[in-house]
Amino acid sequence: MANVNDQVTAFNRSQLEAALNLAEAAAEQMEKLAEVQFKAAKGAYSDGVKTLRRLAAMKDVNELTSATAELAEPALSKASAYVKNLYNVVASAQNQFAATLEQQVSGFNKGMLGTLDEAIKSAPAGSEAALAGVKASLQSTSAVYETMVKAAKQMASIAEANIVAISQPPPARK
């Protein structure tokens, strides 16, 4: 019985440690996100002031039409860079959270399999088949989980490739 209590205590400690690690990682990512947001807001304000000054200095409508195209292109590239920075922060957070989750699931599965092995050894006669079925079910669930993790990673890499492709500057017009 003490062995089960020790296992539960160890599991609870590992879960608490994982929760604290996730909270710390979330705080770090929120700090990075706030930094990206602040830089974008500061840049937008600065660009707005420059644009207003330029518009105020214009003397005729022809200058306005030529300035419109000149002002739009940098804004688009800055917006693209902003989206890419946001994506990088979110992707980094997702990677940290996924790694922590994978460690927790792996540790849980190993612990559960070890506990089931011990239970099978000390099980009353005739119950080995039922416990072996539970163990096989747990192993199948683990395999499905690993397949889903691989698929999620593939989807993340596809999304990242799309973000990189979108963030490339458009070809110059002729």
Image (spheres, helix red, strand yellow):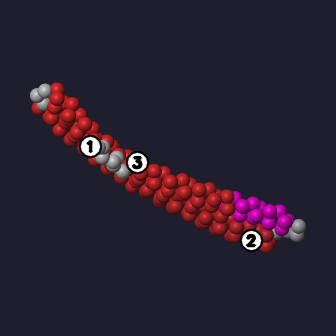
- Specify which label sits upstream in the sequence, 3 or 1: 1
Question: What residue is pinned by disc 3?
Answer: 166
Q: Type of residue at label 2? A: Glu
Which numbered mark, 2 or 3, is in the foreground of this view? Answer: 3
Query: Which residue is outermost to the right?
Result: 126
- Mark identifier at residue 91: none
Q: Type of residue at label 1? A: Pro
Please identify the quarter of the rendering in which residue 73 is found.
top left
- Mark identifier at residue 118: 2
Let me know if residue 128 is in the magenta part.
Answer: yes
- The residue range painted magenta reads 127-142
Q: Residues within 10 Å of mark 2 (few under 14, many from 20)?
A: few
Secondary structure beneath disc 1? Answer: helix
Image coordinates of residue 10 in percent, x first then y, are 60, 66
Image coordinates of residue 49 in percent, x first then y, are 18, 37
Secondary structure beneath disc 3? Answer: helix
Image coordinates of residue 160 in percent, x first then y, are 46, 53
